[in-house]
Amino acid sequence: MSATLQPLPLSDPQPDAAGAQWGAHSSWHWQGHHCHWRVLGSRDQPALVLLHGFGAASGHWRHNAAALAEAGWCVYAIDLVGFGASSQPAHRRHRPLDNRLWARQVQGFLEQVVQGPAVLVGNSLGSLVAVTCAVFFPQWVLAVVAAPLPDPTLLMPMGRRRRPWRRRLQRRLVVVLCRLLPLELLVPLIARTPLLDLGLCSAYSSPAPLDRELRRLVAKPALRPQAPQALRAMSIGMALRPRAATAAPLLQRMRQPLLVLWGSQDRLVPVAISQRLGQHKPDLELQLLPHLGHCPHDERPGLFNRALLQWLQRRAST
């Protein structure tokens, strides 16, 4: 595996600690993809890697990085392939854009940039990526914090393995339907109109965090020319991933400590799903955060940071 790492900018010895531009920014080339990442804190401290959710980017941790760095962590965050300022590739059948590829990206980042294992903290899709990385590359992941951990398959019964002809038929239908969607029209339309606010409102229980910075953070990557093809690629990839790459079997295989933080008023992913997680990983710790939605880290960063740091401290003392 080859990678090209660009050095951190020497002109910014004291990077921003707050706001969507927090941290010292850099780029890293992994398996043909340009990957944007950032860091805040001393490299001598233990590493903590933040993984954003669907439609977001590393800047979404704008209210968390500084507090975590002040608590003694070296805080990293990356833009997953397809999001933020990272590459936005088209669909490739033999290299699907799903949580398995993102987990490999995180492992490559830990090996080549962080150069050691880390605690992974995810929001939504980032949580699924963190759990996937912990299962596939256990030596690189010390613990996982998921806030929350969504996967529609958690609500579905475990079905028997489909016959090859049915899998081929499903693949063709998914690919055709995704190619028929006029994403080249829909994605810029959503990013440029009040439809963006409707989507953001569904992720928050309160409109207070919906500021200009958040809108720009979500809209800017969606307006890049390759955004529709990347959305199509990840829609196909996530729809066709094997059962072993879904949340339930991953949780059953996971051995690292897991904290799950879930907003009690999450309108995107029902809180009822959180009660099913223990069936697959009995030793996880679940905390419901009152009056919060799907992005608790951005909606009530103080509460989120305290819950995270207290759990990490308890874990370190055991």
Image (cartoon, grey):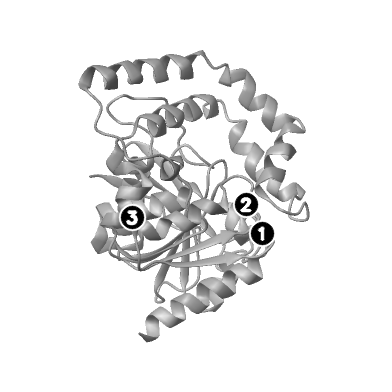
Mark 1 residue type = Leu
Judge left or right: residue 10 versus residue 156. Answer: right
Residue 209 image position (x, y, % from top left): 73, 55
In the image shown, does 284 or 28 lie closer to the viewer?
284
Where on the picture, by quarter, is residue 154? top left
Seen in the picture, residue 27 relative to 156 is either above or below; the reply is: below
> Contact (CB < 8 A) between labels 1 and 2?
yes
- Which residue is identified by label 3? 251
Going 76% across and 50% down the picture, which residue do you hit? 211
In the image shown, does 229 or 28 lie closer to the viewer?
229
- Which residue is identified by label 1? 292
Q: Quadrant of the N terminus?
A: top left
**Cα distance, mark 2 to mark 3?**
21 Å
The answer to which of marks 2 and 3 sits earlier in the sequence is 3
Residue 190 image position (x, y, % from top left): 68, 29
Going 38% across and 34% down the picture, which residue do you hit? 97
Mark 3 residue type = Leu
